[in-house]
Amino acid sequence: MNKKIFLSSPHMSEEGYEMEYIQEAFRTNWIAPLGTNVNEFEKELAAMVGATSAAALNNGTAAIHMALKAAGAGEGDIVFCQTFTFSASANPIKYLHAIPVFIDSDYETWNMSSTALQKAFDQYKALGKMPKAVIVVHLYGLSADMDKIMELCKQNGVTVIEDAAESLGTLYKGKHTGTFGDYGVYSFNGNKIITTSGGGMLVAKDPERIDKVKFWSTQARDQARHYQHSELGYNYRLSNVLAGIGRGQLKVLSKRIEKKKEIFTFYQTAFSDLPQITMMPVNAWNEPNYWLSCITLQGNVKPIDLLLALEKEEIEARPLWKPMHLQPYYKDCDFVGEGVAEDLYHKGLCLPSDTKMTKDDLRRVAQIVIDVCKGK
Ligand SMILES: *Cc1c(COP(=O)(O)O)cnc(C)c1O
């Protein structure tokens, strides 16, 4: 029986940092609700990415929800959202009864196409329905072309929310993804580059907006001894125990990125002679965190062939995200673009990118991919 190889599984520090912070929480009985670990995790992450303020929340989806609410999105408002993404980027638009309009990607970045975004602005301006916000995603740890996206959004006076759930540590022109827009969202879900088992972080340019998010996320209790509520509340904060895991994980983020990059480089070299395989695009201005190593296929090999061959050997791979405008739930939503996201979805595959993989594990994966491509 072969050893199972995962796509991307939790990887706690060898040094045991996470456990030290958890023990500290137990020792001081700050098990719940908030406490030192939450406050420090917020400060440490904000300092690391260069954000002014941060709110630790119970997952990335909640962070997107709060960002949209802070941006003022509500019933009937238009929100532009990258179509090529995981459903959690878009679902909070529906939580707020706003209306998503899906925007295509481009081949250069795999993320939001500035051409499609421009077109969407033109179309919706003509209708007199400008969007409340634009949600741009940095998929697989690649960054969107933020200069172009920001310029268009500034011209149109629209709030930018960066879904950086997959891109903690990714740099665009030397600056962290998640810090260009008005709001940035990170996720610490189990398969992300660092994890708290479940968790999220919202960063924002305006610290007052973060204070407001913290208020909403703790049930929106007014300043009063009796339980008084003037606004709708949520129970969205991260627990102090889990924030301890996050603090420990932050210490090894750069190590994880290094290993993820090694994995990508290994595949790149191993597949350099195969005309069927193209690695995901890494632009000169982009320093990715290489969360997942993704490829597109052309010619005789289909993603499903590789997926099944790997699965037979206990190796986990998965298709690229199925675009939101093709999801049954979102079938009635407007889409602006050319079918790039759809094409990537049909051609692409995420290869195992688990930071616990050894060189032998990588060789095993690569050999299977090579054999399938050579028709063996
Ligand atoms: C994981 C992910 C999210 C959601 O984060 P959770 O912490 O799982 O709620 C949002 N957007 C993208 C692109 C993701 O990959």
Image: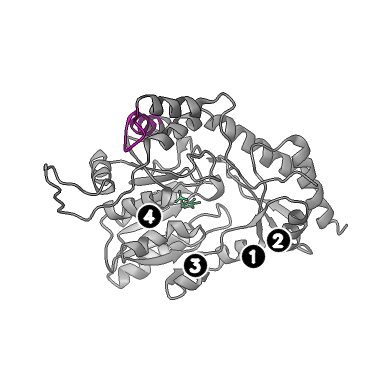
Which structural element holds mark 3?
loop
Residue indicated by mark 4: 152
Residue highlighted by disc 1: 346
Please name the residue that numbered disc 3 is placed on. Answer: 337
Dot 1, how many residues are within 10 Å of its Cα: few (below 14), some (14-19), or many (20+)?
some
- The nearer-to-camera label among 3 and 1 is 1
Q: Nearer the viewer, residue 242 or 165?
A: 242
What amino acid does circle 1 point to?
His
**Disc number lying in front (3 or 2):** 2
* Rendered location of residue 238, percent (x, y): 37, 41
Q: Which residue appears at 52% of the width and 70% of the height? A: 326
- Residue at image position (22%, 56%) is 232
Classify mark 3: residues with Cα within 10 Å, few (<14), some (14-19) or many (20+). some
Front label number (3 vs 4): 3
Are discs 1 and 2 less than 8 Å apart at CB? yes
Tell me the residue that label 2 is attached to: 303
Mark nearer the N terminus (1 vs 4): 4
Q: Nearer the viewer, residue 190 or 99?
A: 190
Up the image or down, 82 lies above or below 63; here it is below
Mark 4 lies on a secondary structure that is helix
Instruction: Please tell me whether mark 1 or mark 4 is closer to you in this view.
Output: 1
Residue occupying the point 80% across, 51% down? 368
